[in-house]
Image: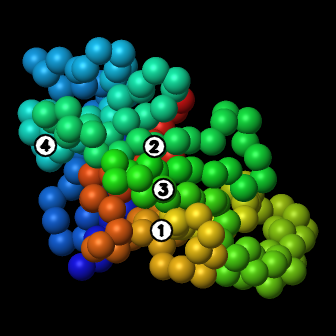
Amino acid sequence: MTLAFTRYTDDKRDELRPRGSAPVHVRRGAPEGRPLPDGCKPRFTLAADPAGASPLAVVVRKDGGRLAVLTPDHEHLAELRLPPRKKRWRPAYGIHLPDGTVLRGHEGTVPSLLLWLVMLPFALLYLVALALSDSPADVTTAPLRTAWKRPGKLFGRAALTESARRRFRVRGDGIDHRVAYAQAVAKYWER
């Protein structure tokens, strides 16, 4: 079964809204009254309620700057590796699962880049029309998708995908939904 969810953000909170399920709330830090393993600094908690009383997963920064996704009982679910702060052309995100499986996600899949190239002339015409009409416009960027796949599988099925509108999709046999939630938040979380 495929899980689809959207990431919503406003000034006060982050929230993940799975289709057909209750929202998952993102809280800064670790749940109160639950100590963390040694050497772990809390980043954020994924919880079923806004108060964070029933956590689903805790994301902590371990030695070396890597993010670990832990269950509330500190069982290791995955390790997330984010690209360096200096953004390259196609930043690479990594998910390392406990069984040794590695999933890599590069911003900009081949189909999304091809679509962007096809749509570029129309976007340029639109920008020229905006300039001539003195209408304000938002900053335009390339609409990119991100797909987390096993390395070397260029056209294989992705375990986790993100659309340009920050909608995420997880295949049923891909990865644990808590790891997908953590990756969705960690990608845009302030570092």
Q: Are marks 3 and 2 in contact (CB under 8 Å)?
A: no
Q: Secondary structure at mark 3?
A: strand
Do the CB atoms of the residues marked 4 and 1 lie less than 8 Å apart? no
Residue carrying label 3:
102
- Find numbered disc 1 in the image and state the secondary structure of the residue it sits on: strand
Task: Answer with left or right where residue 140 lies relative to residue 162.
Answer: right
Q: In this rendered view, identify the residue nearer to me: 80 or 124.
A: 80
**Three-letter amino acid code of the residue under disc 4:** Asp
Q: Earlier in the sequence, mark 4 or mark 1?
A: 4
Residue at the (43%, 57%) spot, across then down:
101
Q: Which residue is mark 2?
A: 80
Q: Nearer the viewer, mark 2 or mark 4?
A: 2
Depth check: 127 or 104 in front? 104
Marks 3 and 4, how far apart at CA: 31 Å
Mark 1: amino acid: Thr
Q: Which residue is mark 4?
A: 49
Above or below, 50 against 24 in this view is: above
Q: Residues within 10 Å of mark 4 (few under 14, many from 20)?
A: some
* Residue 146 place in picture, x, y as percent: 57, 64
Amino acid type, residue under disc 3 in the picture: Val
Q: Helix, strand, or loop for circle 4?
A: loop
Per the model, the C-alpha gap separating discs 2 and 4 is 24 Å
